Image (cartoon, rainbow, N blue to C red):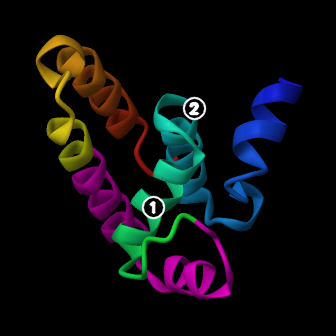
């Protein structure tokens, strides 16, 4: 628990994100890395995807309607997965993970 909190949750500043998106950002951090999680969030929020959560990212994320942000977030997550050369090998598992997370939705 401490490792996940320190190395993923805290580095993505999940406590500062809206409830609707924090789990989803955390999941990408664990699955694809902290920088990728932050970049995916930034892409969904429409800000520069530099992999650093700062005031501009937080403001943009908070200004979005939660459902719109979540759908945009997953569209960028899926686009990333399908761009990886090993998608043919691992894609089914990645898409199952996405589907499971989408069932969680905004909870």
Q: Residue 75: within the magenta? A: yes
Residue located 50% across and 84% down the image? 60
Image position of 19 (left or right of 70): right
Q: Which secondary structure dominates the residues rendered in magenta?
A: helix
Q: Residue furthest left?
A: 88
Q: Residue 103: within the magenta? A: no
Nearer-N-terminus badge (2/1): 2
Q: Where in the figure is residue 15, as x and y percent of width and height? A: 76, 58
Find the magenta span and give its range: 52-77
Which numbered tag is attached to residue 23?
none
Q: Callout 1: few (<14), some (14-19), or many (20+) C-alpha neighbours within 10 Å?
A: many
Q: Where in the figure is residue 83, as x and y percent of width and height? A: 16, 41
Of 17 and 77, the residue lying toward us: 77
96 is higher (above) or lower (below) than 9: above
Q: How far separated are the C-alphas under marks 2 and 1?
A: 14 Å
Image position of 95 (left or right of 40): left
Q: Where in the figure is residue 49, as x and y percent of width and height? A: 43, 71
Quadrant of the frame with the N terminus:
top right
Residue located 60% across and 53% down the image? 22
Residue at disc 2, secondary structure: helix
Of 82 and 68, the residue lying toward us: 82
Residue located 24% across and 37% down the image? 81
47 is higher (above) or lower (below) than 31: below
Q: Label 2, on which residue? A: 30
Residue at disc 1, secondary structure: helix
Q: Callout 2: few (<14), some (14-19), or many (20+) C-alpha neighbours within 10 Å?
A: some
Image mark count: 2
Q: Residue furthest top?
A: 89
Q: Residue furthest front?
A: 85
Q: Where in the figure is residue 73, as x and y percent of width and height? A: 34, 58
Which numbered tag is attached to residue 39?
1
């Amino acid at each position: 628990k401490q490792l996940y909190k320190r190395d993923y949750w805290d580095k993505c500043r999940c406590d500062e994100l809206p409830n609707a998106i924090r789990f989803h950002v955390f999941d990408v951090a664990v699955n694809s890395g902290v920088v990728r999680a932050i970049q995916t969030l930034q892409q969904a929020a429409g800000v520069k995807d530099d992999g650093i959560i700062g005031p501009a990212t937080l403001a943009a994320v908070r200004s979005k309607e939660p459902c719109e942000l979540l759908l945009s977030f997953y569209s960028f997550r899926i686009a990333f997965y399908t761009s990886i050369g090993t998608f043919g090998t691992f894609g089914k598992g990645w898409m199952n993970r996405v589907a499971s997370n989408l069932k969680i939705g905004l909870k």
